[in-house]
Image (cartoon, helix red, strand yellow):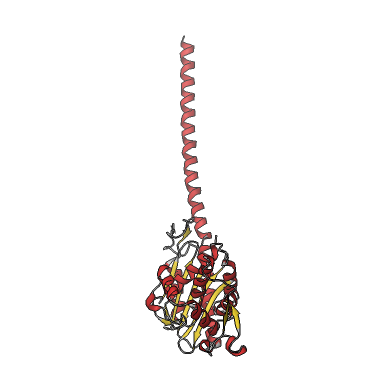
Amino acid sequence: MEKILIETRRQGATTQRTTQCERKKLKICILCTFLLSGLFIFGASRLLGVKDYVAAQIVYIFDITREPTIHHILPSAYALEALDELLARHGDDISVYFENIETGFVYSFNADHVYFSASVPKAMYALYLYQLAERGEVNLDSVHEFTYGDANWGSGIIQRQYDFGATFTLRELLRLNISESDNVATNILRRTNGIYGYKNFISRVGGNLALVGNNVMNSNLTANEAGLFANEIFAYIESGGRYSYEFKSLLLNNRFPFIVSCYPVASKTGWTAYRAWHDMAIVYAPSPFILVILSARDGWSDDDFADFAEISMAFQEFNDKWFVD
C-alpha cells in the first residue's frame, strides 16, 4: 500500500511539473506572437511609406455615389502641404481640383476662384447631346449647314477650310467641337439644339447655373465646377452607353492637351488670350483620377506648358503613391 501511495505522489508531481512547463511554453509562444505581430506591422508601415508621416493613418473612404472600396492610406498632411507649396510657386492665377475616382478622395487648391471658361464646357455640352442621342431624341447622322451666323474666328478649322453652305453630320460636329475645339462647330450645335435644355441638364447634375453663358463658351468656371463636369463625363463613359466609347475616344484625341501623364488622358482644354488657359482631364492611371487645372494666363509659352506638365506629373506621382496598391 505504501509503495502505491509513493508511486501515486510521484505521478502527481510529474503531472504538475508537466503542466507548469506547458504553461511556460504557452506564455513564451504568446509573447513571441505579440512581438512578431508588432514587427510585421512596423515593417508593413515602412513599406507603405508611412514611416516619416505620423499623421498618416488607415481609414475607410466612402462616396455615396459609388460602391464602397477597400481601405486606403489617407494621404499625409506632409504630402498635402507639398502640393500646396508646389502650386503656390506658380502664382495666384491658378486653381486645381484633384479626385481619385476609386476612393472619392479630393484635393483642391483655390478651387472656388471664378475664371472665364473658354472652351472647357464644350465637353459638357457634348455629354448633353450624347445623352439625348442615347434616348433617341437627336440623331448623330443628321446633317447641319454652316451659316453666316455661325462664323467665329476663334479656334477650329471650319472657318478656315470651308465655305458657308458646307454641311456636317452631328457626329462630325461633336468630333470637331471636342478634338479640334472648333468654335464654329460649337455654334452650329448650339443653334440647332438650343441652350435651355442644356441649362436644365446642368441644373439636374448639380451644376451652378449662374456660371452658364448662353453661348456655351462664354460661361464662367471654377475648378470645383469642372471637377463636377469631369465626374459626370466619367460616369457616362463607364456606363457602357451606346455612344460612351465614341465620346471617350474624342476626349483621348484632344489635339491640344495641357495636362500630361504617362497614362492615357481624356481631356478638354480651353484658352482665351489673357483670360484663360485651362485643362480638365480624366487620367486613366491604374487607379483613375480627375485633374483640373485652371489659370488666367495668356498661354502658349514654353513656361506655361512646362508649369502644367510639372503640376500634372506631381499629381500623377501623388496618385500612384497613395492610391495604387
Residue sticking out furthest to the left: 210
Residue at 49% across / 16% down in the picture?
A: 7
Work out which quarter of the rendered image holds the C terminus and state it: bottom right
Q: Would you say residue 217 is visible in this rendering?
A: yes
Q: Nearer the viewer, residue 311 or 197?
A: 197
Q: Position of residue 302 (x, y in %)?
A: 56, 87
Measured along the vertical axis of the image, is residue 237 above or below residue 111?
above
Coordinates of residue 117 in the picture (x, y in percent) = 45, 81
- Residue 132: x %, y % from top left: 51, 69
In the depicted structure, whether residue 67 falls above or below residue 292: above
Above or below, 44 against 227 in this view is above
Query: Foreground residue, 245 or 50?
Result: 245
Q: Quadrant of residue 296?
A: bottom left
65 versus 147 height, above or below? above
Residue 108 or residue 74, whichever sits in front: 108
Q: Residue at x 49, y 75 (%)?
A: 125
Count of numbered labels shown in the rendering:
0
Q: Is residue 263 visible?
A: no
Residue 194 location (% of width, % of height): 46, 77
Out of 71 and 217, give the one closest to the viewer: 217
* Residue that sits furthest to the right in the current view: 161
